[in-house]
Image: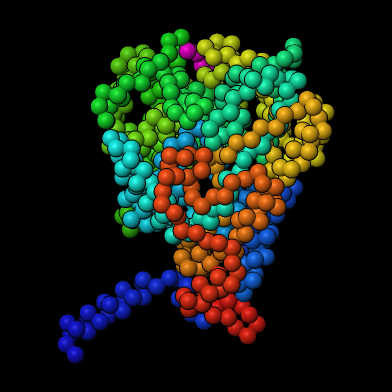
């Protein structure tokens, strides 16, 4: 055999080896114990029970599976920050977890999920905590962003992206919650409550527009989760985000029908596909009395773009964003020109179909006089980022301002009198109530008058409303979704067939009917059924509940079982 032919054979063998899943390195050995995370039963019984059910079904495949239920604050550390073996938070990365993405107004455009959940550039510190890396998908995620002229063409791209994710089964979607909320309609005029498409009634427009029916102008609500912190450059979870969107203004906001409209901006004018001029409202104030000006708006984006370029021992350069949560939403900004005290021009690197929704309506406006020294200090440090910052009393320009808070107990806001859209209520109080019995007791007794977050049995809420004439229930399908996320960096979840088999162990209809009591819609994509236009796709791949089907799928991929029924790698 010639040297040239030998080299070719060796090359082909190498390509074959690298094409095989990592699981092949342990051929014939048992698949090791799999740990599936969820929050505790006390915090979110629905998520706990769903996970427990799926874990039992996975065991039917011959797997040793452990259900690890931990508090949400601890889960953030073990999942979000422990995505790789290099993590300093845990000894090993997570494998599989129950997770949820909540419905936020700016998610009315599918770009945020299409790009930020799966693009390979946000694997290390962004939303892509599962570690997905698919160049074909990356190209689609980038292409839909720049398709500004033809909405139908953008729809085709997003449908193709949904199909790839469904085929690759990196996330096993199963429901979009119907987000039931209970309101005391003897305390508030029900006609003043706004239902926002894909969000429900717990939204910005309700908070500023809800009308008290008595002299008591305090809205009292609760959350099951600790509040972490309040920081305009960190996306710290559902409950803190509700507070953030009320206390920091944005240039645009998503209106109740899901369209971006000017907010802190008086006008947003596109000069061409790359240049947009934003003019701020006159007379806006920060909560400390300083004027809101165009250099503040510019700095809000500059802060999101701030970071340092680091070089490793091999000479490879990498960029570390100081605000990793918001960097993806600002990264397409090429330059910002201050025109005058109230006007500025954004120049984009590439045309962006979602710039208004996912950038102008996403980034919080920052007071430059407060945040510029903070960011400059962080840039001098090697391992710090903005997520570690907590102001003693945060300063924004929104319609509510901070009075007091304890991230483990409560946050108290009051209406900002100098805001052009001053709320009709005077105070807004959110208490941390992890105990479900306490939550139910308070909404019935009147200690709470707006129950916006309920992780328990929705049927319980309906019964309480039926028994209390002063309470009404509201619900709407959410933009958000519940799913099982797989860390695709490591075996066995680096194998698409294994992930597809696990998807077959999720009894979607049973979960909707018996755990959610019908207050959920089936999910098969990261694009919610609430976004009807963006779901006009050909049928996505299905994964019906079938233990036998899952076992057949594994067998077809070369998996086998030992004499004790334990699953063995191919």
Observer-nearest of 388 and 449: 449
| Quarter of the image where the N terminus is located | bottom left
- Residue at the bottom extreme, as displayed: 1
In reply to whether residue 285 is colored magenta, the answer given is yes
Question: x and y percent of residue 115 in the render?
Answer: 40, 45
Range of residues picked out in magenta: 284-288
Q: Main secondary structure of the magenta part?
A: loop
Q: How is the image coloured?
A: rainbow
Percent x, y of residue 165 = 44, 55
User: Does 540 sit left or right of 509 as displayed?
Assistant: left
**Residue at x 22%, y 84% (from the top left corner):** 6
Q: Quadrant of residue 415?
A: top right
Total numbered circles? 0
Quadrant of the image occupied by residue 43: top right
Q: Residue at x 47, y 30 (%)?
A: 258
Kindly identify the residue that appears in the image at 75 percent across and 28 percent down: 471
The x and y percentages for residue 30 are 57, 77
Magenta stretch encompasses residue 360: no
- As drawn, 405 above or below 44: above
Residue 13 visible in the current orientation: yes
- Towards the viewer: 408 or 66: 66
Asked whether residue 116 appears in the rendered view, the answer is no
Residue drawn at x 36%, y 75% is 17
Find residue 273 and report its image quarter: top left
Query: Is residue 289 positioned above or below 518 on the image?
Result: above
Q: Position of residue 192 (x, y in %)?
A: 63, 19
Pick whichever, 321 or 175, lies toward us.
Answer: 175
Compared with 25, 493 (above or below) is above
In the visual, does 206 lie left or right of 9?
A: right
């Amino acid at each position: 055999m010639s040297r040239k032919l030998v080299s070719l054979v060796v090359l082909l063998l190498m390509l074959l080896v690298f094409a095989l899943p990592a699981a092949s390195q342990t051929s014939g050995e048992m698949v090791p114990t799999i740990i599936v995370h969820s929050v505790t039963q006390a915090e979110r019984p629905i998520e706990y029970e769903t996970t427990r059910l799926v874990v039992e079904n996975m065991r039917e495949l011959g797997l040793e599976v452990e259900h690890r239920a931990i508090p949400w604050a601890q889960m953030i550390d073990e999942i979000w920050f422990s995505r790789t073996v290099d993590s300093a938070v845990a000894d090993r990365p997570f494998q599989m977890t129950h997770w949820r993405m909540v419905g936020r107004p700016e998610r009315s455009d599918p770009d945020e999920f299409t790009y930020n959940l799966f693009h390979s550039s946000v694997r290390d510190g962004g939303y892509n905590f599962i570690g997905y890396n698919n160049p074909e998908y990356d190209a689609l995620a980038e292409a839909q962003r720049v398709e500004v002229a033809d909405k139908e063409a953008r729809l085709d791209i997003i449908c193709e992206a949904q199909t790839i994710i469904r085929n690759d089964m990196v996330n096993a979607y199963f429901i979009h919650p119907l987000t039931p909320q209970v309101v005391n309609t003897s305390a508030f005029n029900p006609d003043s409550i706004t239902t926002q498409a894909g969000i429900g009634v717990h939204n910005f427009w309700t908070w500023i527009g809800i009308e008290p029916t008595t002299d008591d102008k305090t809205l009292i609500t609760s959350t099951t989760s600790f509040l972490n912190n309040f920081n305009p450059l960190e996306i710290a979870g559902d409950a803190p985000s509700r507070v953030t969107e009320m206390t920091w203004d944005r240039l645009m906001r998503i209106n109740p029908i899901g369209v971006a409209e000017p907010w802190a901006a008086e006008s947003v004018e596109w000069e061409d596909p790359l240049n947009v001029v934003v003019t701020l409202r006159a007379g806006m104030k920060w909560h400390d009395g300083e004027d809101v000006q165009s250099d503040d708006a510019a700095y809000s984006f500059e802060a999101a773009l701030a970071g340092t370029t680091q070089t490793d021992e091999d000479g490879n350069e990498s960029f570390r964003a100081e605000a990793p949560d918001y960097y993806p939403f600002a990264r397409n900004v090429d330059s910002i020109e201050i025109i005058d005290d109230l006007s500025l021009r954004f120049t984009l690197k590439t045309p962006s179909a979602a710039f208004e929704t996912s950038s102008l309506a996403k980034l919080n406006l920052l007071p430059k006089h407060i945040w510029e020294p903070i960011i400059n200090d962080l840039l001098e440090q090697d391992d710090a980022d903005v997520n570690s910052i907590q102001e003693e009393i945060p300063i924004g320009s929104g319609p509510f301002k901070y009075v007091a808070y304890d991230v483990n107990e409560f946050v108290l806001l009051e209406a900002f009198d100098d805001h052009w859209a001053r709320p009709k209520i005077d105070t807004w109080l959110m208490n941390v109530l992890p105990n479900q019995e306490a939550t139910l007791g308070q909404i019935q007794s009147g200690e709470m008058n707006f129950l916006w977050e309920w992780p328990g049995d929705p049927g319980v809420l309906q019964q309480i409303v039926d028994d209390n004439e002063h309470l009404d229930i509201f619900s709407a399908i959410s933009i958000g979704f519940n799913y099982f996320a797989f860390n695709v960096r490591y075996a066995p979840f680096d194998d698409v067939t294994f992930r597809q088999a696990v998807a077959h162990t999720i009894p979607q209809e049973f979960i909707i009917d018996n755990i959610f009591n019908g207050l959920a819609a089936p999910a098969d994509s990261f694009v919610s059924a609430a976004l009807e236009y963006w779901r006009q796709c050909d049928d996505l791949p299905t994964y019906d509940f079938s233990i036998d089907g899952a076992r057949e799928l594994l067998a077809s991929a070369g998996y086998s079982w030992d004499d004790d029924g334990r699953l063995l790698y191919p």
